[in-house]
Image (cartoon, helix red, strand yellow):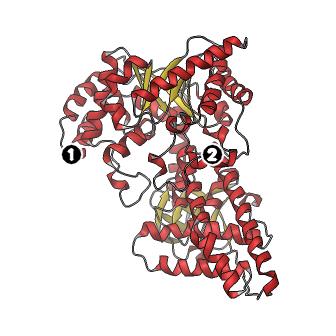
Amino acid sequence: MIVIKGIAASPGISIGKAYVVEDEDIVVERVEIARDRVKEEVRRFKHAQKATLRDLDAAEQKVLKVLGKQHAKLIDAHRLILKDTLITQDVSKRIVGERVNAEFALSEALDQVNRQFEKMDDEFFRERRHDLFDVGKRLLLHLMKRQKRSLAEIEHECVLIVRNLLPSDTLGLKDTKILGFATDLGGKTSHTAILAQSLEIPAVVGLSDVSRRVKTGDLVVLDGEQGMVIINPGPETIAKYEKVQQRAVAEERSLESLKGLPAVTQDGRAFRLEANLDSPEELKNLVALQVDGIGLFRTEYLFLNRTEVPGEEEQAKAYSAVVKAMDGREVIIRTADIGGDRLSHIGIDGPKNETNPFMGLRGVRLFLRHLDLFKTQLRAILRASLKGKVRVMIPMVSSVGEVIATKKLLDQARAELAAEGLAFKEELELGIMVEIPSAAIHLDAFLPHVDFISIGTNDLIQYTLAVDRINEHVTHLYDPYHPAVVRLLDSVVQTAHKRGKWVGVCGEMTSDPRAVPLLVGLGVDAMSVSPRMFLRVKQAVRSLKHEPLKRLIAKAVNCSESDEVRRLLEQSQ
């Protein structure tokens, strides 16, 4: 029995036969190009770029369906690499200046950047080179007219052992018979590790030489909790890990028994527990979970990876199908929260190369510049409201003027539909995402104009603390328990309740059972949770008491450090 220690990348236990994947070597030869063929070679490289961009569009659709909007940002990172001067200019310059084939020019450029990465001490930046190689490999395969290796071709259950796994390879693992994976390379902050966690695939990375020490067919135990791979384990070791697996299965079964039960605390405080919906493909799962409704229906998927603006009929049909499937339970449809840089492919002018697109022209800001686009979506939502209980919510709101402008446009949409003889529900509740500090601080001015609010914790926290939550240098400062965040959340809930408006919450906090006591204590009315965490959050709500947590919040808002807030929450459980 051999034990190899690495880095715990994604929790879980896998026991099975190893399947070792040899490195897929791509041999690139230097070929001199005749002077009159140089322009054609540059064109060939440009075609490969366009094909790679199409790959990324398809990958984004898959990420949105499987993992949601948060992880789709990974594809944005790959797009930025594809647009980097290293790719867009340097490779073409090498082709022209050295009169060499595109494959060689690209590989030379990638090698140069790799050498720079290897000199870096920071793990975050070292790990980003795998994203560079992912894009580079896609380009090379298109240039060489070769197909990417498919792990879906593996016909039996196995534990994958490989030198390195790129993010694009990891994304496809959910549809394979791979029980878990172990790699020689990689770190905790790699996109491969992050994707494995989200896909709930056990993984250990950074094992140095596991791909050389394991042979295909060896029995292995992969311990994603401790970051270990055990080769040829003895009977006692296998029995120990099988018991761990059995306990995990038993926990999953106990969660299944919560379906259909109310999300109510032990002292009788009821909450509406709803789910997020990123695309209609997830509907079947939400219905099976017996959610109380859809607290956040993201509509961005309708606007991506296409060449024309989605029409009213298409949108109305898509929204109606979701509303009808929920059978009377509420559906909160959020108008598209998308940046202008992402709509140029459908003829919508937007800013090019925004320095910080997450704080730029996006959400309601963008749609109020393109009123026809906005009105079309509002008309489609109004028509879908006939199928059930619908509310509409606008994102990225920072001023009351944006709400008033939206209401005016909504009134115009109603008048037009009535004039055209198209049916819709006259009453449609309008809400806003409270995700910008200006809206949270000045909430009392917004409330006369809206029917409800939903706190978008992800953006509200990062904007309040000035922390980019996907920047590894400062991600440790992204803190839902920061006293300023707790105080702001408490202020928002109390302000809304005093004026008789209900408060929902969406964002990562709602899907973290450790943060649920804080939300219960704040007394929010509804939580919209990722489907994967829905039953675990319900279990957490049903194990708590609201009144003690309510008193705890009164203390938490006066804490000076996050650790004090955490200790208070731990003592309450």
Of the numbered discs in the image, which one, if any, rests on residue 561? 1
Image coordinates of residue 555 in percent, x first then y, are 19, 32
Looking at the image, do the residues carrying marks 2 and 1 touch, with CB atoms under 8 Å apart?
no
Q: Nearer the viewer, residue 534 or 367?
A: 367
Image coordinates of residue 6 in percent, x first then y, are 47, 68
Q: Nearer the viewer, residue 418 or 57?
A: 418
Of the numbered discs in the image, which one, if any, rests on residue 343? 2
In this rendering, the answer to whether 25 lies above or below 72 is below
Answer few, some or many: residues within 10 Å of disc 1's Cα (few below 14, many 20 plus, some between 14 and 19). few
Image coordinates of residue 94 in percent, x first then y, are 65, 82
Q: Nearer the viewer, residue 150 or 485?
A: 485
Q: Quadrant of residue 252?
A: top right
Tell me if I can see residue 291 in this picture: yes
Amino acid marked by disc 1: Glu
Amino acid marked by disc 2: Leu
Q: For the C terminus, which image quadrant?
A: top left
Q: For the N terminus, which image quadrant?
A: bottom right
The residues tagged by marks 2 and 1 sit, at their Cα atoms, a distance apart of 42 Å
